[in-house]
Image (cartoon, rainbow, N blue to C red):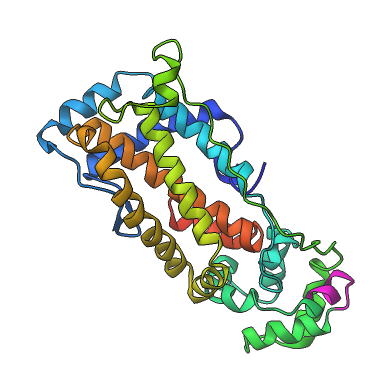
Amino acid sequence: MGTLKNFYGEDEETISKSFKSAVASTLADGGVFILGAPIGPELPNMDLVSAQSEAIGQVHDLGIFSKAYGQTILAIDKALPPGIIAPPVFDPTFVIDIQPFFDFLLELGVLDPGAWFTENYPKLLGISLEALEGLSKCENEMYAEEIVKIDSSLNVDDVMKAAEKICKFTMPSFAFPIFSFEIPDFGLPELLPIEMFAIPNINIPQINWAINFTLLEIIGLINEILSKIEDLITALLQGIVEFILYIVNFIVEALFAALRPILQMMLDSILFVANLITFIGKVIAAFIVALVGHIIGDGVVTVVVAEKLGLV
């Protein structure tokens, strides 16, 4: 398992069950939003919200959407293994355990290590490989000097001493991680003819095919994003909010331009739209977190990103 296990666990059933409450929130909020950016169309027939909310409260799960959600999260986690795409830019807490790193900051008098990390992470990502290699062997002076460049209120000698808490570790191999997503099988052969699932009739859209089509579009866009690694790194170094919105804006406009003509017949159903945009919003959020771990390693930055996306 990869980055997402830290936030979702590894149990498909538990992940699937969480989808129902997410859809209930979508109905209550009138849509899905990531940092204020809307995901997909507005809910149609808002006068039906109360009845639909009551209806989903009485069922165990939301059928294929719940099943697809659980399977997709685990598939994303497998598809985007933690790694380092563009060394020397990577999260140092990928190789240094998070809690010892925070203890290191506390010893230096940093009262809120999480806030300090969030403020300074773009500079931390740029710490030289030489400094980290030295730290890995407990040769801490160069690392201390670079930390003091990031936060001038600190002292080199103090940093060198405190770094004894985090030194002595194995450097990553920098092997290039590969994105390889396998579409889970959402088919329901006991309910639908397999040939209709495999080659759907666009005039009779089916929910399982709609989910597959949506995922295929998202995967194509993720592949396109990964081909723009310099833009990704630039956005990440500008700030976490900027990075998240860069990916959201990149995916959502193109995705719904492709979806609307195909799924138009289904977009008048409030429950279908609530399920669809919840699924898309949650999947995009999971992709973003896994993508950060895939690019710079699954350290503290992925935790901060997950917090911004409401995963923790």
Magenta stretch encompasses residue 133: yes
In the rendered image, the vertical position of residue 169 relative to residue 290, given as above or below: below
In the rendered image, the vertical position of residue 137 relative to residue 211, given as above or below: below
Residue range in magenta is 132-139
* Front residue (pair 138, 26): 26
Q: Position of residue 92 (x, y in %)?
A: 70, 67
Q: Position of residue 197 (x, y in %)?
A: 42, 23
Which corner quadrant of the image does residue 190 belong to? top left
* Front residue (pair 12, 165): 12
Could you tell whether 290 is left or right of 252 in the image? Answer: right
Q: Please indicate, yes or no, whether residue 173 appears anywhere in the rendered image.
A: yes
Which corner quadrant of the image does residue 130 belong to? bottom right
* Front residue (pair 267, 278): 267
**Outermost residue to the top:** 190
Magenta stretch encompasses residue 192: no
Q: Residue at x 45, y 50 (%)?
A: 285
Q: Position of residue 61 (x, y in %)?
A: 39, 22
